[in-house]
Amino acid sequence: MTIEPPITYLITSGELTQENFTSRSDEFVRLLAEAAIDGLDVIQIREKALSARNLSVLSSRLSDELHDSRTKLLVNDRADIAKAAGCDGVHLTTRSLSVEAVRKIVGTEAVISCSTHTVDEVKRASDAGADIILFGTVFASPGKGEAVGLDALVEAVHAAGESKLLALGGINERNFTEALDRGADGVAAIRSLNDRASRRVIIGGR
């Protein structure tokens, strides 16, 4: 993996549905292309309401759109779609196939990221060969339960080994440097990195 820290990792908002896909997907692609122009390192497509067909269409369009950029494009959970669409990799949750199984599908050059919520999960993901590990919720975030805090982030950084450890949860333009100062290799976010003004502050302040 050729992404150098500090890494900015955007998770899409989940706004697309089967009903609005035709009317809203063009603008969705345009805004993510804009994020790549701003210097974002990774985009994770996390549009859970879409059918496999529409997710494949969206992934292919974004892969084509970002082809000449430095931004890596990952598909949430669906290694088959990521590979078929020519994306850079796949993001795995705690309910997904194992890193080892997915590596056999997407190949050794693909980027695999994993969601984790405990230090033990971080160590397991690192031992399995995950390239990027998202750890959180670090700061309080609506609907995400209790924050684990910065002390737990430091423990997670130490457990991550050769994997890149990114802070997730409640990240914004006011607190992202606290995560970086604790040793995180970057930050991942939905709300703040989808907002262009906040995104530019975070990218510019790394």
Image: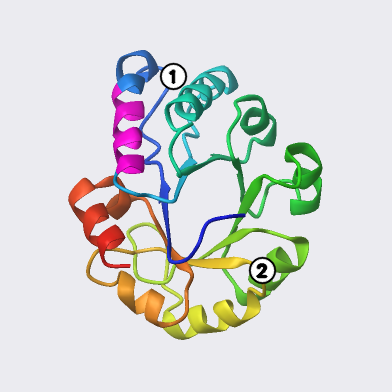
Task: Classify 10 Å Cα crowding around label 2: few (below 14), some (14-19), many (20 and above).
Answer: some
First to last magenta residue range: 27-37
Question: Please, what is the three-letter code of the amino acid marked with disc 1?
Answer: Gln
**For residue 1, which quarter of the picture?**
bottom right
Residue occupying the point 39% across, 19% down: 21
Locate residue 156 relative to residue 67 in the image: left or right: right
Which circle's residue, 1 or 2, is located before the other in the chain? Answer: 1
Kindly identify which residue carries mark 2: 121
Helix or strand or loop: what does disc 1 sit on? loop
Kindly identify which residue carries mark 1: 18
Q: Position of residue 107 (x, y in %)?
A: 76, 42
**For residue 200, which quarter of the picture?**
bottom left
Helix or strand or loop: what does disc 2 sit on? helix
The image shows a total of numbered marks equal to 2
Locate residue 61 relative to residue 202 in the image: left or right: right
Residue occupying the point 64% across, 70% down: 122
Locate residue 9 relative to residue 80 in the image: left or right: left
15 is higher (above) or lower (below) than 95: above
Are circles 1 and 2 on residues that touch, CB within 8 Å? no
Magenta stretch containing residue 149, yes or no? no
